[in-house]
Structure formats: structure tokens, C-alpha cells
Amino acid sequence: MKLLQITKVAIKNITSNKLRSILTMIGLIIGISSVIVLVGISRGSSKAVTSQVQQLGTDILTISIYSSDYSLPYDKLNELAEIENIDEVVPYKTISKTVSRGTTTSSGSQIIATNDKYLNVRNLNLAEGRTISIIDIENQSKVCIIGSDVATELFSLTDPLGQTLKIDGDNYTVIGVLEEQGTSMGTNTDSMLLIPLTTAKYLDTDTSITSLYAKVSDENKIDDTINLIENCLRTILQVSTDYFSVSSQDSMLSAMSDINNTLSLLMGGIASISLIVGGIGVMNVMLVSVTERTKEIGIRKSLGAKKKDILIQFLVEALVLSILGGVIGIGLGLLIGNIAENFGFTFISSDTTILISFLCSAAIGLVFGIFPAYRAACLNPIDALRQE
């Protein structure tokens, strides 16, 4: 009952100075909401990237040759494909060129030069038409497979199959349209445009192979398969592993998880600075409150109030301020996070983050309220009564 009375007095003292109380809580509100927003967006981004990596498939290995002085000859692909546990190997090269039809230009189209294995390895399906054939590769045919967004943008309601479009001014015949799928590994497959690897030379692009996907049969043998691929590439290229890399989706996920965890801690740390500033604000206001109420403290002590009673009184006031600011900050953080989702961000709130934020606000009230409360409790009642 005594604690309830102390709380009521604390609330009354806080509400009697509304403007000062609001200004005190602003630092805490900004700090708590910043922590929730930044950590939530960081978690959302991490989940989005992880989802994109997983869409590629855990049975896919990515092979990259770093040095421009080395590349894999096309006729050596079979040597990689014959490695134990490998089903298929597909080269790919990303090209940036203008894609248009008539006066309409496709925005954001990504051209990928590859071979007949690409769709199977990337787990992509055709809505209509056919895939790139070996004959297309041998004849360097100017044909292409387009994503659903490209089909809609350039052909509208017209069936694109058999129609032509222009890539960098040259005519290419549409032989297939991909099913709508969305984004995978940072690439919007719906805006993708596939052409034969050998045809890339017409686009002033080097057709050397420096990037490949390899699909494995048994995911449990991925580590052994990576070693076999590295040995094969060392033999073919006559270079060390410093010039190329073979990575699995699991290793990429692990690396990205470490990076995202570090970023989350960094963002949380930056936002926590606002909490410290808010805590200092609480302490300053409580010190001012002690100065203003010195005579009141003296009267209470002369009437029998103990040192601990005064200490608890001011600690409760600091706690109420901090907790109220924390609750408002949590609500504001969740609101900003939900608004951010409308602007393309992925926001994931966490019960753990909310709980930690709430406990932090309470802890700030205790930590930064101790000194003013102790100072009030130690006032000499005679000196306090003389205070004007």
C-alpha cells in the first residue's frame, strides 16, 4: 500500500510539470524507437537475403574465377561435369545492354548469356516456348528467352513467342517465356533475358567463362565435391585457389548471417547512444526536481520520513518517467517499422527486442535516478527547511 501511495505521488509530481516531463522522455522515446526500427529492419533484410539465397537451392555450387587473365575454355566444361556427385555445370555471364521493341524500352532488364542447362540448374520453368538448344549455341543464334515482366512491358497483350525484340539494336527472336517467379539471388528473374553464351560476342562482350553454377546430386557430399572441383580447376587453369573460389549456399548463408549479426549489433549500439543521452536527461531533471523540492524533503524528514523513504520516492519518479518513455518509444518504433514496409523495407519485430527495450528503459530509470535520489535522501532536514 505504501508503494502504491509513493507511485501516486510520483505520478502527481510528473503530471504537475508536463512540459518538462515530456522533454525528459523524448530522449528515451527516440532511443527505444531507434533500437526497435534499426534492429527490426536489419532482421528483415537478413531474412530477405537468406530467402533469396535459399531460392537458388542448397544443391547449387557457385564457381567464380577472379583473375581476368584466366578463364575456363568451353570445351573443358565436360571435365567439371564428369566429377563425381555433379549433375550439371552451367556457365553464365551478366550483360548490360538496352532491350527494346519499337519505341518501348524495357527498364531494368538483365541479360544473361548461358547455355541449354541454365533453366534446369536454376530451377526455372518455361510458361511457353522452348529453352536454348545446343544448335543455338553452335550457330550463335540470335534468340532469347524472356521473363514475364519483359513480356508484359514489351509485348503487352500480344503473344511474344516468335516475335522479335532488339538488344543493343540487333534483332533477337523470342523462343520462350519464363514463368513468373520473382527475385532470386539479387536477380529479378521476371526481368531476366537469356541468350546463348556464344551469341554474346555480337554484344561486344567477352565470351570467356569466369562464372558457373554446378548442381550436385547429393547435398551431404558438398564439401568433398568442392575439393574435387578445386583440384580440377587447379589442373585446368594451372593456378592456385587464390584465383578462383567454389562456394556452397550454406557457406554463403553462414557468411551473410555473421555479417548481418554484426550489423545488427552495430545498429543497436548506435541507437543505444540515444538511450544514454535520454538517461542523462532523466538524471538532470531529477536533480532539478530535488533542488526545487528541498524544503518539501526537509518537512517530510522532520515529520519522520526515513532516508529510504525519500530514496524510494525519487527512484519511483525516475522509473515512472523512464518506463512511460519506454512504452511510448516501443509503440512509436513499431509504427515507424510498419510504415517503412510501405517504402520497400522488410521490418520484423521481435518479442525479445521489445522486452529488452522495455527492460533497458526501466534500467535507465534506476541507474540514472540513483544519484539524484541518493542526494535527496542525504539532505540534512535542518538545512533543507532553511532553503527558500
Image: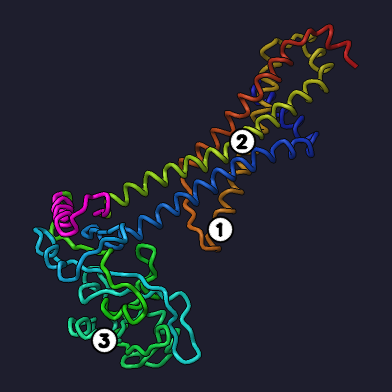
Is 230 situated above or below 357? below
> Which residue appears at 58% of the width and 58% of the height?
339
Q: Relative to 280, is 85 on the left or the right?
A: left
In the rendered image, which quarter contains the C terminus?
A: top right
Q: Report the front residue among 215 and 264.
A: 215
Q: CA distance from mark 2 to mark 3?
A: 63 Å
| Residue 197 x %, y % | 27, 76
| Residue type, mark 2 in image | Leu
Task: Quickly name the residue at label 1.
Answer: 340
| Residue 15 x %, y % | 76, 35
Residue 234 magenta-highlighted: yes
Closer to the eye: label 2 or 3: 3
Q: CA distance from mark 3 to mark 1?
A: 46 Å
Which quarter of the picture shows residue 126? bottom left
| Mark 1, other Cα within 10 Å: few <14 / some 14–19 / many ≥20 | some
Q: Relative to 63, is 110 on the left or the right?
A: right
Task: Quickly name the residue at label 3.
Answer: 141
Query: Magenta segment, principal secondary structure?
Result: helix
- Provide the residue span drawn in magenta: 224-247
Q: Relative to 245, is 183 on the left or the right?
A: right
Task: Quickly name the residue at label 2.
Answer: 275
